Image (tube, rainbow, N blue to C red):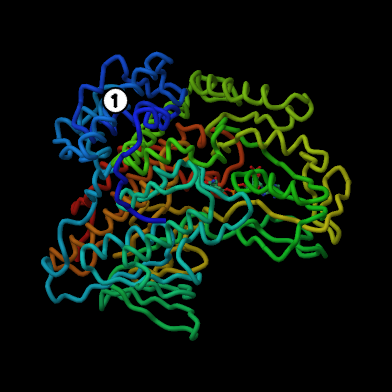
Amino acid sequence: MRLHPDPIPITESDEEIAAAIAAVTPVPLLAAVAALTGDLSLLRDDLRPDVGSFDPDAGLGPDQIAAARALAAAALAAYRDAGSVAAPQPDPADLRRIIEFMAGGPISDDYVAVMTEELALDGADLRAPAWTAADVAPGRPFRVAIVGAGMSGIAVAHRLDQAGVDYVILEKNADVGGTWLENRYPGCRVDVPNHFYSYSFAQTPEWPQYYATQSSLLDYFRTCASELGVRDHVRFETEVLDATWDDTRGVWRIEVRGPDGTDTVESHALVSAVGQLNRPNLPDLPGIDDFAGEWFHSARWDPDVDLEGKRVAIIGTGASAAQFIPAVAERASELTVFQRTPPWLLDTPNYHDDLPDGMRWLLEHVPGFANWDRVYIFWRSHEVIVPMAEVDPEWDSTESVSMLNDIVRQLFTAYYDMQFEDPELRAKVLPHYPPFSKRFVRDNGIWARTFTRDNVTLDVSTIKEITETGVRTADGVDHDVDVIIYGTGFEASKFLTPMTVHGRGGVDLHEMWDGEARAYLGLTIPEFPNLFLMYGPNTNIVINGSIIYFSELEARYITECVHLLLYDGRTSLEVKRAVHDEYNVRVDEANRRMAWGAASVNTWYKNASGRITQNWPFSLLEFWQWTRKPDPADYVLR
Ligand code: NAP
């Protein structure tokens, strides 16, 4: 997969151009063509989208869509005739006009700034550091250790690299890619469209699907790590066992276990980029080790276990299991799926589709189309759906949290009515908790096709124990199988385990947290100087945005913290306890007002005490505003 490949000049006939764009969403098309040609008259008021609408064409009717495509086709033909030479990049006023057309109306300066960063037109990297260590603190040794070479680790490494800050990445696996390296189960793919689920600074039009499969994603992160020069800084097969802050010397002493045994690495700052979904969770079921057949967790998929013709049990129907259940159903002779809580399905007809030829053509031939498509997805998945997850304290129902949320529930329920004819099956698969209190599962009809197969049974009884021969349910039935697959998620609330971390005065992070992981902006922790967490407590998103957006903003914040230390000639930076505590009170309050905080449904967002330790309850814009630059007043600088 290539990053930023050169566009191909257009040589196609008018008819071929019209055919290529015949099925493409008109809004990003018009925005891209207006930016490419400089012809802003294409952005007609009567073609403005209603981005709040669920409809993929954003509320435009057939006549408007036809008019938009005709305008775009004519402008692309003129661009071709003039030798496929792009107009100069739009100036800020024109850029704003195009962005606001795409957003459906006027938006704030901050939103325009976020969208401009996400757009990264012509490879502009607006989140890159505007300084280098050599300029700010020439000759000062300063090294950052990053734990993990997954999506977040690569992002922060790239930023440090751009600033000329020395760094090393400690990675327990033998390759980069993190979650996309470890999760290799059949059917694994992303559930956020890729033109958005990718770095703003490393865009590619070469995604083969809207929602790429694991192998494409791994290819992308490998390509980024190599082309950005990050890979050379990785110590592979090196697991961090402990990190201890040495206050006298102002360094982190990091004990690692690598191919040559244990070793100690020192750094001035430490970044944890280990993710939230890193350690598989096996259920606490009696007898789990007694099973005599083969068994494994989905994140440790065993390709040597041949499922062909086997009797298989799958435990769990979360986002991972929902992807591999259909694939296993095609191989197993009998498949029994044990469901505790059904997922809400989100109707996504193109979920498994390759990009249509027209879309591929546009991505290859129209410079900037991928970028505009990216921000269009960003905007539509941005804050528009957040109100649908907000709790109305007056609303009295266990199945929805507000009138708006109930409308979503009815819409989602209609999809089940359409998909599941058998009332008994429909009753089993239909959730009875508010939509958006846990992550939805995208579906193109495969869920219904799978559970109506003759070899598949959906069992909703409680599992009592695992026996030598299979799964015993509470009704006393023994389900004998050859293979058990656990799609039971991750130990998400045990942040940073199993490594131990000791801060100032030897304070133990896990003892201090005592199961209640908290950080300021998800990033910094009192008593732990120069320690930064990526995808830390309360930075997970449930329904909107892309986690890469968060990682990029965290990477910028961390890099600017390093700047603060270097510029000020300081050794350490530690968030003030009062700042951290006050922020966390706000986070907890806000999470209680969201569907995932209010609903009593099981989720990995809640820790053992029921507190939401995982989720971001505010807008995506607020994360951008609060992390744009560290405020020195929030920190003790020594
Ligand atoms: P998960 O959402 O936590 O699902 C775990 C499943 O196992 C749930 O159905 C859960 O039931 C069930 N389970 C757990 N313990 C059980 C027990 N003792 N008995 C019976 N059932 C049990 O984990 P996941 O599917 O791995 O997904 C985790 C997250 O990873 C997702 O929310 C998403 O953020 C991410 N993910 C994303 C993608 C993607 O982008 N396409 C794919 C996979 C995962 P309950 O619901 O009743 O707890």
The number of numbered badges drawn on the structure is: 1
Q: Which three-letter amino acid code belongs to the residue tagged 1? A: Ala
Give the vertical position of 416 relative to 627 (above or below).
Answer: above
Give the vertical position of 325 relative to 499 (above or below).
Answer: above
Give the vertical position of 97 relative to 315 (above or below).
Answer: above
Q: Choose top left, top right, bottom left or bottom right for residue 452.
A: top right
Q: Is residue 619 visible?
A: no
What residue sits 75% from the left and 45% below the top?
Answer: 337
Residue 497 is situated, as x and y percent measured from the top left of the image, at: 51, 64
130 to the left or right of 24:
left
Residue 462 is situated, as x and y percent measured from the top left of the image, at: 77, 43
Can you name the residue that lies furthest to the bottom here?
260
The quadrant in which the N terminus is found is bottom left
Query: Local crowd at mark 1 within 10 Å, few (<14), some, or many (≥20)?
Result: some
Q: Is residue 473 visible?
A: yes
617 to the left or right of 451:
left
Q: Looking at this view, is 357 or 415 the one in front?
A: 357
Q: Looking at this view, is 532 or 177 the one in front?
A: 177
Residue 115 is situated, as x and y percent measured from the top left of the image, at: 27, 38
Residue 178 is situated, as x and y percent measured from the top left of the image, at: 48, 61
What residue sits 14% from the left and 31% below the top?
Answer: 93
Q: Looking at this view, is 391 or 179 the one in front?
A: 179
283 to the left or right of 170:
right
Residue, disc 1: 74
Give the vertical position of 50 relative to 572 (above or below).
Answer: above
The quadrant in which the C terminus is found is bottom left
Instruction: Check disc 1 and report its element: helix, strand or loop.
Output: helix
Is the CB atom of the residue marked by disc 1 within 8 angstroms of ligand 1's nearest atom? no
What residue sits 54% from the left and 21% below the top?
Answer: 406
565 to the left or right of 103:
left
